[in-house]
């Protein structure tokens, strides 16, 4: 009997999306810490799941959701929160940052053609660092991307993105961000946003 075809949703991985084979899905989650993915029996189920949050789908599926820790330390209000969004259909990416104290938008860039979520998260952190340094403000920066945090530490965006004429502007921005990290120092802590205990990152675009 032929094996029934499945569809795979990747909410968090190297590249978010819906994949028609396990091999294609596996490429997006291999080596990605905290990857979120699940298989579905039909494409329509996968599309419906992808329109929701991973936690909603997993809970609905009967798996136990991780318990919220009532004693978890809350986020520091005096901080900047950043996030990126990647459109699965168009490949466009954008990123933004907010002052967590008052909810004011500090910057919003994009959309950029043929980007990735990780590139957006990386650029958002560096943009925040440069902005805070310019104004001599030592606020911490929250992001929900461990990958971007690692790239910032290494001062290098370790992306596998294919640079083309379509995303030339994004390539230039990425290179400028890497140069900024190499030529500048900063003392701002870059912290992981604890989505499980704190809810969605306030800089989230709300398109999950």
Image (cartoon, helix red, strand yellow):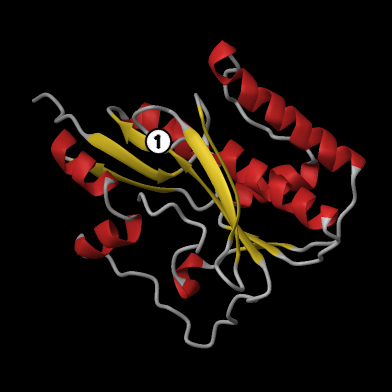
Residue 158 figure quarter: top right
Q: Position of residue 154 (x, y in %)?
A: 79, 42
Q: Residue furthest left?
A: 1
Crowd rating for badge 1 (residues with CA inside 10 Å; few <14, some 14–19, many 20+): some
Q: Residue furthest top?
A: 165
**Residue at image point 91% right, 40% down:** 183
**Residue at image point 27% right, 53% down:** 52
Q: Position of residue 6 (x, y in %)?
A: 21, 34
125 relative to 178, above or below:
below
- On the image, numbered disc 1 is attached to which residue? 87
- Say whether residue 208 is left or right of residue 187: left
For the residue pair 23 and 177, the one nearer the viewer reads as 177
140 relative to 71, above or below:
above
- Say whether residue 85 is left or right of residue 180: left
Q: Quadrant of the N terminus?
A: top left
Is residue 192 among the parts visible in the rendering?
A: yes
Is residue 42 among the parts visible in the rendering?
A: no
Residue 100 figure quarter: bottom right
Q: Position of residue 90 (x, y in %)?
A: 38, 27
120 relative to 63, above or below:
above
**Residue at image point 55% right, 82% down:** 72
Query: Element under label 1?
Result: loop
Total tally of numbered discs in the picture: 1
């Amino acid at each position: 009997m032929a094996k029934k075809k499945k569809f795979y949703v990747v909410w968090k991985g190297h590249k978010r999306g819906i994949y028609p084979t396990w091999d294609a899905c596996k490429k997006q989650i291999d080596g990605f810490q905290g990857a979120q993915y699940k298989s579905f029996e039909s494409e329509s189920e996968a599309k419906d799941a992808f329109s929701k949050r991973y936690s909603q789908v997993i809970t609905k599926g009967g798996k136990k959701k991780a318990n919220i820790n009532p004693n978890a330390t809350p986020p520091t209000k005096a901080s900047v929160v950043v996030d990126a969004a990647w459109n699965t259909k168009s490949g466009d990416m954008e990123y933004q940052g907010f002052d967590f104290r008052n909810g004011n938008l500090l910057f919003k860039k994009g959309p950029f053609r043929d980007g990735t979520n990780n590139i957006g998260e990386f650029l958002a952190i560096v943009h925040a660092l440069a902005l805070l340094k310019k104004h001599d403000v030592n606020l911490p920066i929250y992001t929900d991307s461990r990958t971007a945090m690692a790239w910032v530490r290494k001062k290098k965006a370790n992306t596998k993105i294919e640079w083309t004429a379509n995303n030339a502007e994004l390539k230039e921005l990425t290179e400028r961000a890497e140069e900024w990290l190499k030529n500048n120092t900063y003392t701002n802590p870059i912290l992981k946003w604890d989505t499980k205990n704190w809810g969605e990152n306030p800089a989230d675009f709300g398109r999950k």
